[in-house]
Image (cartoon, coloured by chain):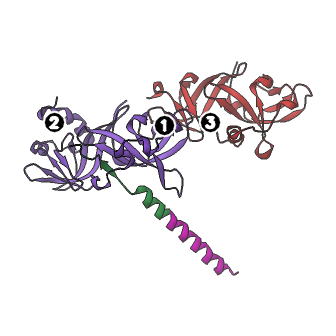
Amino acid sequence: MNDSFCHSVGRKVVSRASAKELGAVEHLLVDDQQRNVAAVVVGRGKKARLVEWARLSGFGPDAVMVVDEGALRPPGDDRERSAADGKLELVGRRALSERGNELGTIDDVTFDADTGALVDLVIGERRAPAGSLLGSGSYAVVLDKSQEP
Amino acid sequence: MNLLMTASQIRGLPVVTVRSGEDIAEVRDVIYDPEAGRLVGLTLNRRGFLAGRSHDVLPVEAIHAIGQHAVMVLDESSLVDPVDAPDDVAHPATERNVLGNDVLTEGGTSLGKVTDLVLLVGSTGEVVGYQIDKADGGQGYIPLPAQLSVSGVALVVPNITEEFVQEDLVGLGATVDEFRSRLGLT
Amino acid sequence: MSVIGWLIVAVIVLVVVAALFVITRRRRRGGGVFATRSKR
């Protein structure tokens, strides 16, 4: 079943082991090469924690279920710290083609809630397939030339 | 997708990596070969509010693409240390800045002064003409290869260039081929 | 310090930042469009 970044922000994160609420989804960290959701950022600022996709028992429409509280960990490297600070957030980022022309702004990103695989990036009325994603960072999301108007 | 851009539109563009979506520099100078009619490289400034020149340069081979909003490179390692770059890019001939150069026909008529360079971008960097402030007023465009010589103070162009002064970029794009065949180049 | 005093400090800071901005802008914008050296 498909879900989207905009819909999942704010969703509660619950431990399967203890049923305790651990926080809410703040950001989803994407792996550009694998084109999937690599980790979920829970909480903000100093309290931000990451949960790797593999440590989820389920990404559901009402709650994101984490195997246990131990799956939450602080950011481990610069990239994870940037993600925790929201600097790598795809939604709201400018979309550039690999040819250097602006395509618009990323309004949302859809993904398969079972596997974490990205489905497409929504840019206004258009949908760019996840396969066209070449790279993303704090300045832009770069899509291949098939996305040129 | 190929489009016509001027050097002043390219200067100041961010240099963005395809692989990591980061703006790692911005364009400072445009260096071109007037004889071959092609872009040779770019020098760079660092990004940021109070930042200055960047040490690294971008020879044309290191550029993935030039577009309306960014110059694209594959990743950070695409920036080249000047010791590894062609001399014209590592140490641009600052005395050969063509902006402001007088455009003189072989016959001795001034067509105006150079205000910009026009390039065909996309996956190659071909120089197609110059933008000029016309001697009789207003802006015009003349096609390349137009000049017989360049000194940094003046450009000397074939006499027939006078017939090919265009009002806009669209006109320039349309006449480049005709101009070249008139010069016996195609 | 009085309000006037703080205002003067603020103006000085703004002037310094503006000057730095103008100086670095000119260092960045300097240059232009260069032809390669003749091979002939």
Magenta stretch: give its range: C1-20
- Name the amino acid type tagged 1: Ser
- Can you give x and y, in whole percent of width and height, for residue B98 in the image? 27, 52
Chain A visual colour: red
Disc 2 packing (10 Å; few <14; some 14–19; many ≥20): many
Give the residue at x 85% y 25%. Answer: A67
Give the secondary structure at mark 3: loop
Residue B182 is drawn in which quadrant?
A: top left
What distance separates the C-alpha of mark 2 from that of mark 1?
Answer: 36 Å
- Residue extending farthest to the right is A18
**Secondary structure mostly seen in the magenta stretch:** helix
> Is disc 2 on the same chain as disc 3?
no
Q: Is residue B16 above or below residue A126?
A: below
Can residue B57 be seen by looking at this rendering? no
Front position in the image: A86 or C31? C31
Q: Is residue A7 magenta?
A: no
User: Would you name the residue on which mark 3 appears?
Assistant: A91
Front position in the image: B130 or A5? B130
Chain shaded purple: B
Residue A69: mark in rendering: none
Chain C visual colour: green
Give the residue at x 39% y 44%. Answer: B42
Question: Of the residues tagged 2 and 1, which is closer to the observer?
Answer: 1
- Name the amino acid type tagged 3: Val
Give the residue at x 65% y 76%. Answer: C6
Disc 3 packing (10 Å; few <14; some 14–19; many ≥20): some
Label 2 chain ID: B
